[in-house]
Structure formats: C-alpha cells, structure tokens
Amino acid sequence: MAEFVYRPTKNRDFYLRMRLLHKSRLSPEKSTFFRCYKWVLWISLSLYFFSSYFISHKPIPLSKTHLSNSNSVHPSRALFEAVNRTLQESEADWGSFKDLKLFVYELPQKYNEDWLANERCSNHLFAAEVGIHKALLNSGVRTFDPYEADFFFVPVYVSCNFSTVNGFPAIGHARSLLSSAIQHISLQYLFWNRSQGSDHVFVASHDYGACFHTMEGRAVADGIPEFMRNSIILQTFGVEYKHPCQDVEHVVIPPYIPPDSIRKTLEKSPVTGRRDIWVFFRGKMEVNPKNISGKFYSKKVRTEIWRRYNGDRRFYLHRHRYPGYQSEIVRSVFCLCPLGWAPWSPRLVESVALGCVPVIIADGIRLPFPSAIRWAEISLRVAEKDVKKLGRILEHVAATNLSSIQRNLWDPEVRRALMFNEEVQEGDATWQVMEALYAKLDRSYRRSKVSSQ
C-alpha cells in the first residue's frame, strides 16, 4: 500500500494535556467514583476545618489548608493530585511489565462504537476485538502520550456485520474497513508511517485470522492484506505448520466467551460438583457433511462422531442449539472440541472454564498462551483419523489419569488465563496478551531509537 502523506494535527503538548485530563476518565464507572471521591474529600476537609475552628476559637492559617507545597490555594489542585495518586496505586500490579506503554487510537465511531448498537457485537465468539479494546482502555499499560508508546492498538470491529440470512458474521467488508482506518491514522498521526506499522497491533478473531474469510481455500488465496503484513496480529487461528494465514507476526488468542456467563453458571454448579454426563457435544454435526461449495465440513470428523456414537448411551450428542448448554458442560466429564471450518472452537474455552476435560480433535492446532497454560496436563488430543477409537481412548484415560487431569484443569488460574475481562485481572487473557507483546519489545520504534543513540 502506498505511504500516506502525514499532516500533523496534534503536537506533543496536546498529548501531555490529554494524559492529565484522561486520568480521571478511564471509564464511566471510574469517572463517577472519582467525582464522588472528590466531593467526599472536600466535605471532609471542610468539616475538619470548621470543627477545628469552633473547638480552638482560633483561625486556621491558610497555609495549613494546603495538601501540597504548591503555591496555588485552589482546593481542586490537591484533590486532583490525590486522584492521580489513587490511579498510580491502582496500577501498581502492572509492575511486571515495567515500562511497557501502549497507545490506543481514538478512531471515529464508525470503526468501533457504532457497531455496538447490536448487543451481539460484544458477546459472540469473535468479540475478542471488543473485549481487548475495552480492557486496554482501563489498563495500567495504556499511555495517552503516543511519543512514549511501544505499541499502538488499532481498535476496528470487523466481526459485527451479522448476515440477515443466517445470522453469522459477514466479514467481506473487513479489508476495506481496516484499510480506511489505517489511512485515517496515517493522515492524523506520524506513527504508522515512521515504522510502516511494525509496532501496531490489530485483532483478527475470525476463522482464518487476518486472511478474513471463513473458507480456508478462499482465505489462503486472498492472503493477509499487504497493509497488515508488517504489523502484529492477535488472532484465534494458529497451527503448528506453515500456513499463509499466520505468515505475519502474531499472537494466538482464545475466542471470546462472556465472563459473566461463566460466572453465573459456576454460581449454580461449581467445577467440583457432580458430573453425570460422560462425553458431551452439542453443535453442528452434518449427516451429509458436503456443503454447496463441495467442501466437507469439519473434514467429516463431526459426521463420523455422530454416525459412530449417536446410539451410545455414554455419549450425550445433540445437533441443535440450546441457550443453556453451559449447564450441560459443567455436568460433563469429557467435552469434545472437534474442528469446524477452522481448527479452533469456542468449546475449548468453555470446557476449560467449566471444568470439563477438553478432547481436542483438530490436527496441528496451536493453542493459546502455552507459557501460562500447560495444555498437555489439562486436555486430551485425539487425531482426526482416530475418531473411530474415541470410546476406547476415553475409557483408558478415565481408568488411569483422569483425576490428575481434572486437578490441573480446575486450577482457577487456568480458567482466568482464557477470560477477557473488562477490567484487566492479573493473569487473565488480556494480561497474557501484554506478556506476549512485552516479549516483542524489539519491534518498538521508540526503544530502537533510544538504543541507537
């Protein structure tokens, strides 16, 4: 893509002012809290001063009322400093990332907020693009000064254009929307052009990541857009072999599952509760897997599962949707996670979060955050060709090391590592993303300039 002409509209003084102004605007909840905090502190100080006066009958010197050494006598200055100290204390847990700084572009609403008019946008399986954005806005690594940033997050929601025919996300507009966003930031800021986007971060939480298509053949043919090839992609797609749709600097992330849905399910049925379903799967299982394009859905794996085990009383298999399916997962010992069109599945996250041993049937899949989650200790992998042996394989595990797997799986830290919380928690999925970016600091333009001086 041709380099855009940069027309600076903001200088660094602007960002320094914004940094101070935004300290109290990290989120609506925090903004309300700090307004209340300010008034409570002001009223408390006033009561203290008046009570001191009536007790001692002596005027209190003006200098005694200052909460700092500032020459200003305006009380809001002291209150503002107190708020800043509170913010700094709340960010103390981010110390493990040292001085990692990330700037979040404030794009026109057509790139993100406007899509949230549809509630599904923020809670469906591709909603990591929304979840990560929200989390970063409130995170301790965010900076309002792009000149001190190591990375630049580009918040574009491309998964919320739901088809009126089948209800699935239609992502045919993804390339043009992203290209438009890059043109915008290239014209408004200097940071894209100076690094050719190598320190910029995008989310591609779709079947084949930044190839932006649900069918592998078409995704491979289209490839990753040229304008994103230098950037860092956070994507759900990942395999252990060479693939055009991961031929870019990337981090494999989990699909999005609303944390509230997991929390509510576990409030009713804890992970250590009774599990009366031995093997569970609910989802698309085609009796005739060849679709209209001539491709075989799930490489016939799901069809084989249905044909072999539908009559087996040990297997709880259902082909139709059910809104309360998480209540079934939390009752199950093994949860099947076969590939669909792509290798990954939201069932993987739901199974782990609800304590059901995930049985991964997707050859060559690369799983998210291996440094935080020891997948071999909490899950099973069954080769696609061995589906016919699935019953015997699971019987063997149940008779040998099932209790060990469940003990590892039920560790709360494992569940936390796959959840995108709106407020970042230590060890959660956004935290893992920051860990991954911290390992890529060699791509930081700012640091490369400092080291070369």
Image (tube, rainbow, N blue to C red):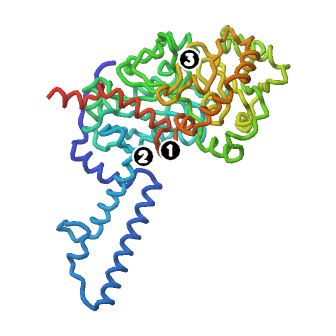
Q: Position of residue 41 (x, y in %)?
A: 37, 70
Mark 2 or mark 1: name the one nearer the start of the chain: 2
Kindly identify which residue carries mark 2: 138
Q: Position of residue 206 (x, y in %)?
A: 54, 24
Kindly identify which residue carries mark 1: 422
The kind of residue on which mark 1 rests is: Glu
Label count reads 3
Q: Residue furthest front?
A: 400
Check whether the beta carbons of the residues at disc 1 and disc 3 lie within 8 A of each other: no
In the picture, measured across the screen, residue 201 lies left or right of residue 310, that is left
Kindly identify which residue carries mark 3: 365
Check whether the beta carbons of the residues at disc 2 and disc 3 lie within 8 A of each other: no
Q: Quadrant of residue 393?
A: top right
Residue shown at 69%/10% (left/top)?
386
Q: Position of residue 449 (x, y in %)?
A: 19, 29
The kind of residue on which mark 3 rests is: Ile
Question: Label 1: few (<14), some or many (≥20) within 10 Å?
Answer: some
Q: CA distance from mark 1 to mark 3?
A: 28 Å
Residue 186 circle label: none
In the picture, measured across the screen, residue 172 lies left or right of residue 251, that is right
**Is 110 placed above or below 16 here?**
above
Q: Position of residue 150 (x, y in %)?
A: 30, 33
Check whether the beta carbons of the residues at disc 2 and disc 1 lie within 8 A of each other: yes
Mark 1 or mark 3: name the one nearer the start of the chain: 3
**Is 127 placed above or below 59 here?**
above
Say which element carries label 1: loop
Q: CA distance from mark 2 to mark 1?
A: 8 Å
Question: Label 3: few (<14), some or many (≥20) within 10 Å?
Answer: some
Q: Pick the residue in front: 448 or 192.
A: 448
